[in-house]
Amino acid sequence: MVPTPNDYPSDIEIAREAKLLPIEEVAARLDISADDLVPYGRNKAKVALSLLPRLEGRPQAKLVLVTAISPTPAGEGKTTTTVGLGDALNRIGKRTVVCLREPSLGPCFGMKGGAAGGGRAQVVPMEDINLHFTGDFHAIGMAHNLLAAMVDNHIHQGNVLGIDPRRVTWKRVLDNNDRALRDIVRGLGGIGNSRPRESGFEITAASEVMAAFALAVSLVDLRERLGRIEVGRTFSREPVTAADIGAQGAMTTLLKDALAPNLVQTLENNPAFVHAGPFGNIAHGCNSVLATRMALGLSDYTLTEAGFGADLGAEKFFDIKCRAAGLRPDAAVLVATIRALKFQAGVELSALSTPDPQAVERGIEHLEKHVENVRRFGVPVLVCINEFVGDHPDELDVLLRAAERIDAKVVGSRHWEHGGAGAEDLARALVETVDQGKADFRPLYPDHSSLLAKVKRIAREVYGADDIIADSKLRARFHALEERGFGHLPICMAKTQYSFSTDPALKGRPRGFDIPLRDVELRAGAGFVLVLTGSILTMPGLPKVPAANAIDVDGEGRVVGLF
């Protein structure tokens, strides 16, 4: 009988069975002394930023991005692959650190679930990481909302800057999915409660404070980024920044401890940094620059991931994070699954368990486009087939034979089921890929290109679109940003993650479409220009049956139902 996922323990059961090392012992594997740690209990700690200057001049690790095909309800397992591959590299003698984003509470209690990996490839303590962890998200939310309160207070206390209440763009944030807070009227209850106006909430992971936090290279840099955040306009249409309000110092104070990277471990007791968590559609979807830099100075291999598929996450990792931090990746691992490729070929979700090699064959063109996209950046790519329990051998053979067609090495991996031991073939293939030294990283576009030219290049080359659509009013807003001196910034595209196009229903490798642009917004603190397409929500809602319904605490105080 072929085993199914139901024959295996749940993620939280596996995590609970793990024999965790004291965090000081995990740190010692990277030659981090106890003096550089700020422990949060026995199994997690922050690593002091004072370690970074001592790492200067050391040989740098090989930097590898783990990305994936477009996400589907069938799952791809990008985080699971990152963790499993990291364990496998350590098993074959390569000192490796994985760098992941922190999970947001909203998706954990909503539909997506946690973000600590799965099966035998997880970072632990899983419950802590998926819930409050070291409090970073709360600190970011407090800093964001402090700025909102100071803006409202400035208007209430005489409004010396002449801020137009109708043009305040800085909302508040909450790390929860709550559609009722997307649009609100605040300031009701009389003159003592300030002036009523429309506003709303965003989820904390969508905050510009989060994006700036993830891209900052030091505490001083973070303070400068926070000061550049634009919160609205004056009556004369001039921009108002957090520095104008005088908020950047207090905001930085709230974030100074959170800025130190968090160190945890995998199920196999290998070190992992889990730090920062910007969304991958409304922001750049990468872990912090500081955690990545720290890992690069402490290891032979540093594995990191970027949100959603390679058309969003990898493009933003290369064009935003690497550009901002001066990183030069050595390779990329592109994760795909048989089930997801069948879904991209048009197979219904309910039929994905039925063997269908022809559907896998049809889905390969979707994989091929993602491979092409990564190669545009001069980065060699290795395709990982994240094998699910119950995958049919004939379907796997179709993918393995596709290597010549997509001009990339394809390796199967069973890390979900077997942990690092199941990914050793993948680890050896990655080392071989990196040792060939073919990386010649280059961003997709130069800084000096116009903003619209950058958008058009992403749309045409990465998404495969014919062109972009923008009316004259929107084009004028792009030009206005350039006139203000922001034309050098990279582009952050806010687009559905489910398709190369802006229509989530267009699966596979769509052709003959345009990318309609809805709006453009400056993110001066983060350091990019946000271009919105379609209806991207910055405050998600809960599904009909949220994951929260299954989460509870048993009589011994242990969390149950978290996945």
Image: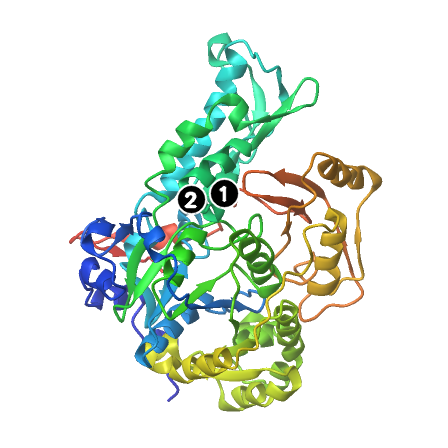
Which residue is the extreme one toward the front? 57
Question: SS at mark 1?
Answer: helix
Question: SS at mark 2?
Answer: loop
Density class for disc 1 (Cα within 10 Å; few <14, some 14-19, many ≥20) is many
Question: What residue did someone put label 1 on?
Answer: 212
Q: Viewed as shown, does residue 11 lie left or right of 535?
A: left
Residue 422 position, x and y percent, is: 36, 82
Residue 299 position, x and y percent, is: 35, 67
Identify the image quadrant of the N terminus. Answer: bottom left
- Could you tell me how many numbered marks the image carries? 2
Camera-near label (1 vs 2) is: 2
Q: Viewed as shown, does residue 128 lie left or right of 404?
A: left
Which residue is the extreme one toward the left? 556
- The picture quadrant where one finds residue 99 is bottom left
Question: Foreground: 412 or 88?
Answer: 88
Q: Viewed as shown, does residue 125 lie left or right of 360?
A: left
Looking at the image, can residue 348 be seen?
yes
State which tag comes first along the sequence, 1 or 2. 1
- The picture quadrant where one finds residue 122 is bottom left
Residue 218, numbered label? 2
Give, as a three-letter code, the residue at label 1. Ala
Looking at the image, can residue 352 be seen?
no
Residue 511 position, x and y percent, is: 77, 68
Residue 142 position, x and y percent, is: 40, 33
Verify CB contact (< 8 Å) between mark 1 and mark 2. Answer: no
